[in-house]
């Protein structure tokens, strides 16, 4: 059952040169107990898509159309008060840098207790008990002691666990994990990803993982959506995606990860376009080795290329599986 559903989301920014569109008809959904990975290079729109769900957007950002539904409720039409109740409690953000969410002036315990007081309406011993349980759940040893420590006394991995504990203490139903392991070393990365997977399975939590790391996606995600220049260019169940990638951008990304290395890693030439850059047709065409004439003129529609597998590339035209 879908807990979070984003449909045809269009978003742009008011800039000095006018309105620049950054997201184009972005659609994805995540079910309870499922991890969806939103993948792509920096600036492709994955973080902006996730932040639209939380409506934590820069001041000059405008959502021009689309529907974002959480547990059947249209978030774009919800009153601000309802949204505040959902954000941080029902839908929680695990950021890349946990220090953006932790206040260095208060102990981690004080901050966790504050979250529990606001969202769970618990006080005193009950709140303390809930905080200790949340620390236990994220495998922070000596929970009682650790709650009295300040953020600077925690390692990077421990800070990230503390943020996850805050989400668990609120019984969050959706976790948005935005590059949650980028700032951590490899061993700790694996621990945090294993923890997220454990939470997903044991609590039936839905996880939206924002990442550029396909190796991580291969190991942990259930579904994949690849973004390029503000559009989802391919989406599929993870197993299908890694066995039968379809879009040339996805294939280029896969060829650039070490697990696929045979002789040397391939790199994707060029850079993704900025939102100000106007590119006719398929926005990937200046970098695509398979570019055809039509690609420079028309935007490729989505084609069905397998079960629940969609690819927006004209190379699929011959398959006659056009979706739209
Ligand atoms: Fe390449 Fe054309 Fe497919 Fe775009 S539509 S990815 S340019 S082949």
Image (tube, rainbow, N blue to C red):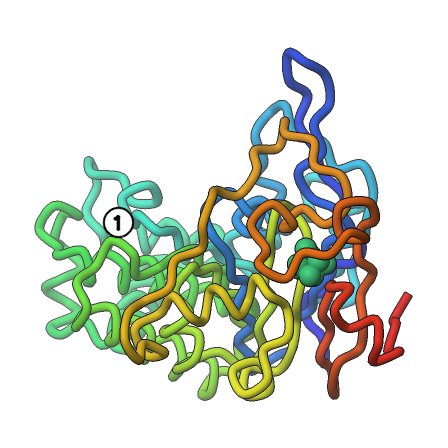
Answer with the quadrant where ligand 1 appears in the image. bottom right
- At x 19%, y 35%, the residue is 105
Q: Is residue 232 visible to the viewer in this orientation of the structure?
A: no
- At x 69%, y 44%, the residue is 23
Left or right: 259 in relation to 273: left
Residue 307 image-quadrant placement? bottom right
- At x 32%, y 55%, the residue is 112
- At x 27%, y 76%, the residue is 263
Q: Position of residue 217 (x, y in %)?
A: 44, 74
Residue placed under numbered mark 1 in the picture: 110
Q: Residues within 10 Å of mark 1 (few under 14, many from 20)?
A: some
Quadrant assignment for the N terminus: bottom right
- Figure label count: 1
In this view, the residue in front, 107 or 213, is 213
Q: Residue furthest front?
A: 293
Residue 123 image-quadrant placement? bottom left
In this view, the residue in front, 47 or 57, is 47
Quadrant assignment for the C terminus: bottom right
Residue 204 image-quadrant placement? bottom right
Q: Position of residue 226 (x, y in %)?
A: 58, 63
Q: Is residue 26 visible to the viewer in this orientation of the structure?
A: yes
In this view, the residue in front, 6 or 143, is 6
Left or right: 48 in relation to 213: right
Q: Position of residue 311 (x, y in %)?
A: 71, 69
Vertical comparison of 183 with 216: above or below: above
Vertical comparison of 45 with 238: above or below: above
Vertical comparison of 199 with 254: above or below: below
Element under disc 1: helix
């Amino acid at each position: 059952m879908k807990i979070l559903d984003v449909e045809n989301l269009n978003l742009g920014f008011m800039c000095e040169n006018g309105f620049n569109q950054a997201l184009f008809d972005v659609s994805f959904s995540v079910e309870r107990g499922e991890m969806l990975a939103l993948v792509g290079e920096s600036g492709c729109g994955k973080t902006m898509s996730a932040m639209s769900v939380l409506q934590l957007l820069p001041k000059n950002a405008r959502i021009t159309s689309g529907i974002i539904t959480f547990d059947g409720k249209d978030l774009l039409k919800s009153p601000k008060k309802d949204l505040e109740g959902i954000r941080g409690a029902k839908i929680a953000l695990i950021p890349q840098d946990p220090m953006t969410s932790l206040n260095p002036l208060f102990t981690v315990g004080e901050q966790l207790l504050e979250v529990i007081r606001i969202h769970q309406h618990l006080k005193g011993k009950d709140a303390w008990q809930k905080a200790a349980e949340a620390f236990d759940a994220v495998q922070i040893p000596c929970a009682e002691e650790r709650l009295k420590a300040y953020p600077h006394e925690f390692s990077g991995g421990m800070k990230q666990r503390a943020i996850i504990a805050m989400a668990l203490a609120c019984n969050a139903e959706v976790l948005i994990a935005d590059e949650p392991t980028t700032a951590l070393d490899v061993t700790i990365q694996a621990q945090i990803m294993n923890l997220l997977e454990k939470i997903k399975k044991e609590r039936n939590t839905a996880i939206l993982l924002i990442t550029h790391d396909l190796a991580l996606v291969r190991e942990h995600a259930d579904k994949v959506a690849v973004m390029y220049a503000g559009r989802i260019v391919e989406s599929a169940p993870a197993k299908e995606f890694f066995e039968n990638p379809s879009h040339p951008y996805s294939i280029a990304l896969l060829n650039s990860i070490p697990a696929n290395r045979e002789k040397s890693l391939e790199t994707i030439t060029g850079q993704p376009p900025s939102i100000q850059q106007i590119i006719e047709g398929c926005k990937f065409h200046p970098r695509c080795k398979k570019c055809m004439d039509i690609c420079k003129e028309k935007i490729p529609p989505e084609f069905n290329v397998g079960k629940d597998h969609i690819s927006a590339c004209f190379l699929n035209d011959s398959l006659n599986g056009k979706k739209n």
